[in-house]
Amino acid sequence: MITMTEIARLTNVSQPTVSRVLNGSQTVSPEIRERVLACAREHDYQLNALAKGLQGSKTHLLGVLVTDISNGFFASLAKEIETAARKNGYSIILFNSDYNPRSEQEYLDVVRRYRADGVLAVPIRETSQEWQEYVKKLDVPVVTVTRQAQGLDSIYVDHVQAGAMVAEYLVERSFQRFLFIGKEYDGKYVGFRRALDERGLGDRTANVIYQEDGQFYRALQGLLQAGRGRVGIFAGNDIYALRALDALRTMEIPVPAQAGVIGFDNTDLGRYLNPRLSSVSQPIARMAQAAVARLLDCIDRPGPREVLNSPFSAELVIREST
Amino acid sequence: MITMTEIARLTNVSQPTVSRVLNGSQTVSPEIRERVLACAREHDYQLNALAKGLQGSKTHLLGVLVTDISNGFFASLAKEIETAARKNGYSIILFNSDYNPRSEQEYLDVVRRYRADGVLAVPIRETSQEWQEYVKKLDVPVVTVTRQAQGLDSIYVDHVQAGAMVAEYLVERSFQRFLFIGKEYDGKYVGFRRALDERGLGDRTANVIYQEDGQFYRALQGLLQAGRGRVGIFAGNDIYALRALDALRTMEIPVPAQAGVIGFDNTDLGRYLNPRLSSVSQPIARMAQAAVARLLDCIDRPGPREVLNSPFSAELVIREST
DNA sequence: TTGAAAGCGCTAACAA
DNA sequence: TTGTTAGCGCTTTCAA
């Protein structure tokens, strides 16, 4: 691939002059500019981003870390981030942690190796000590997306609040027993549980960590046998919701008559399911844009600033499943 | 961030010696090795990949270009590629073309700028002149994934053959009229159509390009009114299939009694749909691994070789929707 | 076994 | 307006 030095030789100017032309400096005579540009075009010149980055200026690389890109929600998030970044001349290095903290840490090292200008991350456990430490060690700005990490720039939907909102809604719709599918430490469960407790419904609430179908069946069955009344199931994400719906069908429990299901993320598929899935919608595009904007601002104008804590509001999208 | 030169200063050795130690050279005395390694650990040294790449050796960066990462199939593909690449010490620069050829070309320029060692791509139109040309201009190896590009390394499922397989299956299941959802030039349609033509069923076959729901409803309605007999719908991907299923439900057409739907890609969601979706399964993980292996081989041992044309076989996964 | 020197392609300071 | 020089952090000769 042709270099500036080579172009300089071909056009009889110095290499820095070529640099000036190619970077749009106005202090170059028109004739030289034309000559250099013509030569660059002719040989299909492409800047060597490594050399530019090495030189100390920005690399125009952003690290993007998600837990699982094969989850439609994160795939959409990554897409929106990539689009927003590209608009600003940045490219994306992508990484999947697969919910494995070791992988997560390894990736932050990769980010450092390539001297990425910043990182957008969905941490595995945003509240953990490790995450905070890794981020501190990184000497580039990091914005946490879709999660709230104490003391770090975070752009997210308040999961605790969303969980409470779902609880309220389910109670209103006269569901009488409650099941959350997901991890205990999930903010959604915390808020869900708390709201139910406040209504004296805590003893009618359970949670189950979805690992395999059989286990979920058993948990659901247990709950059903433990008493009577419509069961409201709050799934930690739409994928769990889809599986819950399937389990209910298998068990021949009518939805939403006897059991209702509400998902989280409001991914595209929910609109087309049978029954159509109620879900909690997060403003993916807006969050992605805000995250990229914040990150680029930190990159462009370094220096201390207040920690950004930017909760977006979630929205209940009610369809047929509740 | 600490550099080799800095470590050299701190440990009283020359910078190249630090390089030797950090690269595991055996020609360094144990004491120096220890001293250097200790210092590197202490200061949390990370190689500057830009400097290394600039120096002429490999960048250990792979470009990955997909049409739409928010499609579950490509998300899974990207995930498998990323995993395989990381196992070999490579990182991924990700790009979405969004089916826009301009974006596609722009990305190949980004790949050149960062001096990526190779590219894995799902081209928009693998048969187009432009794609062939862009790839030729790139001076790094490119492997086309999930599509067959003439004259370029390709790892794919034979769409024409898969389409024919679907046609055969639908005929066997006594569907009598046929609809393909997707682009006319799609290999799947070509094979589907041809197989149907060969059976004298061509005049009972139609295709529709899914743009919006209303249009699909009309097309389906048109086909239904045009005659009688069960309609077999072959959707170009599982997302279209999901929508087709939804449309049929809206129109109160029983599935699979009066109309059947078979998707493509066999994404995770199909297993849980109501009715469970029949679909054509592509071996994503195996294709991703083969593609990465081929690409790394081309990178590690440059030089002319025969074009790789590696079709994987698709598999019919039959569930309730047909 | 170690060090000195050169150079990858670029930007930035300074000089002319 | 243009050129000269230096240097980013590394690998790769070549010499000692």
Image (tube, coloured by chain):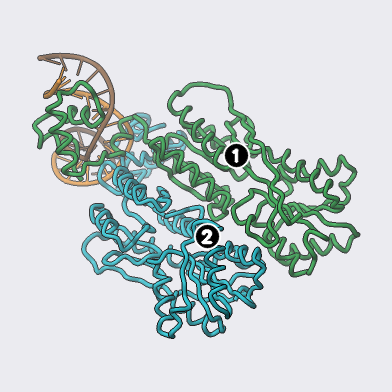
Chain colours: A cyan, B green, C orange, D brown
Which image quadrant is residue B218 in? Answer: bottom right
Label annotation for residue B130: 1
Query: Does dot 2 land on a helix, a strand or a loop?
Result: helix
The reply to whether the C-beta atoms of the residues labelled 1 and 2 are less than 8 Å apart is no
- What amino acid is at disc 1? Glu
Quadrant for the C terminus of chain B, please. Answer: bottom right
User: Does residue A158 appear in the picture of this structure?
Assistant: no
* Placement of A208 over or under B24, stated as above or below: below
Task: Name which residue lies at 38% across and 60% down.
Answer: A292
Label 1: chain letter: B
Q: Residue A150, position in %: x, y?
A: 28, 67
Task: Name which residue lies at 88% across and 50% down.
Answer: B203
Q: Residue A28, position in %: x, y?
A: 32, 45
Label 2: chain letter: A
- What amino acid is at disc 2? Gln
| Crowd band around label 2 with a 10 angstrom C-alpha radius: few (<14), some (14–19), many (20+) | few
* Placement of A78 over or under A264, stated as above or below: above
User: Does residue A34 appear in the picture of this structure?
Assistant: yes
Q: Which residue is mark 2?
A: A215
Label annotation for residue A131: none
